[in-house]
Image (cartoon, rainbow, N blue to C red):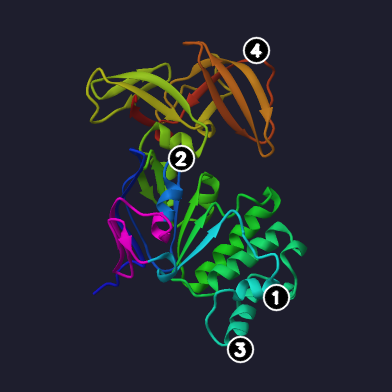
Amino acid sequence: MPLPPRLEIRQISRAFDGRSVVRDVSLTVQPGQVSCLLGPSGCGKSTTLRIIAGVEHEDRGVVLVDGHEISRDGRGAPPEARGIGLMFQDFALFPHLDVAGNVAFGLGGSRAANRARVEELLAKVGMGHHINHYPHELSGGEQQRVALARALAPRPRIMLMDEPFSGLDDRLRDGIRDETLDVLKSEGTAVLLVTHEPSEAMRMADEILLMRAGRIVQRGAPYNIYNTPVDSEAAAFFSDINVIPSTVRGALTENAFGQFLAPGVADGTAVDIVIRPQHLRIDFDRGGKGPNPTPTDGSAARGVVERARFMGSDSLIEFRMDYDGSILKAQVPSVFLPKVGTPMWLMIRRDRCFVFPRA
């Protein structure tokens, strides 16, 4: 018989002053798994986390740990009895305690056992040589490592992390994320991470749960959720997009770039063809001199360079299209900065397009 998930919530809902903030949210997290609640500010991510932790109460729904109910319809175990660790963007270290005292705070074992656990965790997070230092003597990244060790010290079965890296500068953030992930996996902890940054979710999560207006609108592995978005808004959350309006006729939609399949969409439906800038191709051979477009790429449409910017590893070029005056963006590897006003032909890859009924 398979073991139950380490964490499970079923149809959790919460409203404040009549305004629904979390709506029928369900999820599971297995031991050693990192799941990520991803979405814009105000979508209900942090409230969901607080309900699981027990510092906020659900109006209805069930929270289970290892298959055992710890809360139902707002009545359940207090936070300290749930076996759940918490990490927030504010590290909240005690300024009057040294690193060892911060990590040991709340441990109930013997002095020797607590010291051994403190030393073990500080070694894991690379902070063993700071064991006698105080928080004000540490950098932000070092404080984050101490906060992680403190949260792991009681051996929580579940770790809830609410934007824990947002206070770190970009130079440190990626390295500390990776180190944190390695430590959590080595402890076998089930992790539920909250973030509004798609890059953080893609880097850390085994599963992403995309939230919007209190609901989970899509869930899946990072690769799948990026490459098969549920709608235009989901696609736009992960990257810039180009949107080309069209209308369906006979399961096809046609525009200046050719015909695109729209299976299952009724005739007359207004749709948006969505394509990311990196999949908009500049056809340098067009203008009557180059080869005919391939079936994969469809037809070519002409635009005029409106703006070109070098972004570091690639260049972003904006085109004002001849067919309707709209702006499309193309992302090109390396340095490519054509002059404003230069006419160029563009093509889009059909296999990289999404066709969505217009919201």
Q: Can residue 290 be spotted in the picture?
A: no
Q: Which residue is mark 3?
A: 112
Q: Does 72 appear in magenta?
A: yes
Q: Please state the extent of the stretch shown in magenta in the rendering.
A: 51-77
Q: Which element is circle 1 on?
A: helix
Q: Residue at x 44, y 36 (%)?
A: 235
Q: Which mark is residue 341?
A: 4
Query: What amino acid does circle 1 point to?
Result: Gly
Residue at mark 1 to residue at mark 3: CA–CA distance: 17 Å
Q: Earlier in the sequence, mark 3 or mark 4?
A: 3
Quadrant of the image containing the C terminus = top left
In percent of width and height, residue 170 lies at 67, 48
Residue at mark 3 to residue at mark 2: CA–CA distance: 45 Å
Viewer-side residue, 215 vs 329: 215
Q: Earlier in the sequence, mark 1 or mark 4?
A: 1
Q: Nearer the viewer, mark 1 or mark 3?
A: 3
Q: Which residue is mark 1?
A: 128
Q: In the figure, 59 relative to 191: above or below?
A: above
In percent of width and height, residue 266 lies at 22, 24
Q: Nearer the viewer, mark 3 or mark 4?
A: 3
Q: Which residue is mark 2?
A: 42
Q: Are marks 1 and 4 in contact (CB under 8 Å)?
A: no
